[in-house]
Amino acid sequence: MFRINYDALGITASLACAIHCAILPLMLTSLPVFGINLIHNYFFEYFMIFLAFAIGIYALYHGYKKHHHKLFPVILFSLGISCLLLKELFHSVHLWLLIPAVLLIISAHYLNYRLCRKANHCHSADCNHK
């Protein structure tokens, strides 16, 4: 049966966001000549943050509820998303908020992945995934 690893998908979305934020402005500076502006498109930026949030919160909730019951990955993820939102508001410190945001989000998914793998064999009384 095909199963989606939402932590891997969350890490991929976070990395795609980091690549978008770091490389896209360098590679696509000629797009405004053609009337396309993805570099400072706030709709696109907030859409990417929302996409990372939606995928991430689903993966973390699933891991929390069905496997490890630990809130620390959710806290890390929330701090990362908060940094992403703050980066959109405070452009002068864009990079100082982007780097911790990506590191926090990836760390949250990695920790969630590790905790899920560790708890996969517990099957204690409060686990509902037997």
Image (tube, rainbow, N blue to C red):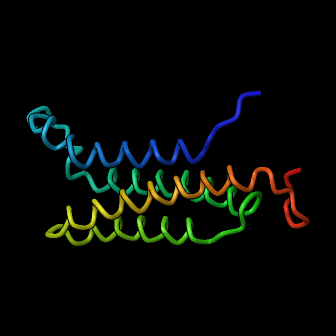
With 126 as the anchor, is 42 left or right in this view? left
For the residue pair 99 and 115, the one nearer the viewer reads as 115
Work out whether 64 lies above or below 35: below
For the residue pair 13 and 66, the one nearer the viewer reads as 66
Q: Position of residue 79 (x, y in %)?
A: 43, 71
Q: Residue at x 66, y 61 (%)?
A: 61
For the residue pair 6 and 111, the one nearer the viewer reads as 111
Q: Position of residue 10 (x, y in %)?
A: 51, 48
Q: Position of residue 121 (x, y in %)?
A: 80, 51
Work out whether 23 lies above or below 119: above
In what quadrant of the picture does the N terminus appear? top right
Work out whether 32 lies above or below 99: above
For the residue pair 85 and 125, the one nearer the viewer reads as 125
Residue 24, located in which quarter of the rendered image?
top left
With 51 as the anchor, is 16 left or right in this view? left
Query: How many numbered discs sit on the rendered protein?
Result: 0
Q: Position of residue 117 (x, y in %)?
A: 68, 49
With 43 as the anchor, is 91 left or right in this view? left
Q: Residue at x 37, y 58 (%)?
A: 103
Q: Residue at x 21, y 67 (%)?
A: 96
Residue 13, located in which quarter of the rendered image?
top left
Q: Residue at x 35, y 48 (%)?
A: 17
